[in-house]
Amino acid sequence: MKLLALIEFLRARLKTVVRLSLALLALLVLLDALLIDKKDAHTWIERIPGFWAAWGFVGCVVLIILSKWFGHLGIMTREDYYNE
């Protein structure tokens, strides 16, 4: 059960995990702004520093929200569902 121990470890240090994640995201956006050549971008929006990081973040948030909504519609059920 190493995965369970890892999840519990990270949950106990949630503020640190969030801060490290935000710092990594800021570093990636900074590296994107400084090191990536934007002259061959196909559209104007691709020239915005960190566009693909923001696009991926929004996509993940939408996926999580939709999956939770879909789960609460009927996939998730009581634990004693089969005991009745």
Image (cartoon, rainbow, N blue to C red):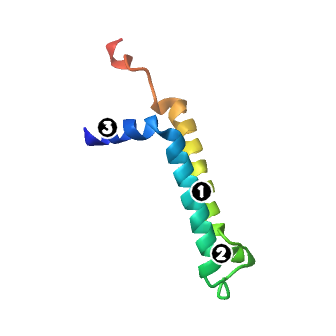
The N terminus, quarter of image: top left
Nearer the camera: disc 3 or disc 1: 3
- Quick one: label 3 or label 1, which is nearer the N terminus? 3
Closer to the camera in the image, 36 or 57? 36
Provide the secondary structure element on which disc 3 rests: helix
- The residue singled out by tag 2 in the image is 33
Q: Is residue 38 left or right of residue 25?
A: right
* CA distance separating discs 1 and 2: 17 Å
Residue pictured at 53% horizontal, 31% vertical:
72
Residue furthest out toward the left: 1
Query: Where is residue 24 shown, x and y percent of the image?
Result: 54, 60
Residue 28 visible to an observer of this rendering: yes
Q: Residue at x 55, y 31 (%)?
A: 73
Viewer-proximal residue, 55 or 16? 16
Q: Where is mark 1, residue-wise?
A: 57
* Mark 3 lies on residue: 5
Q: Amino acid at mark 2?
A: Ala
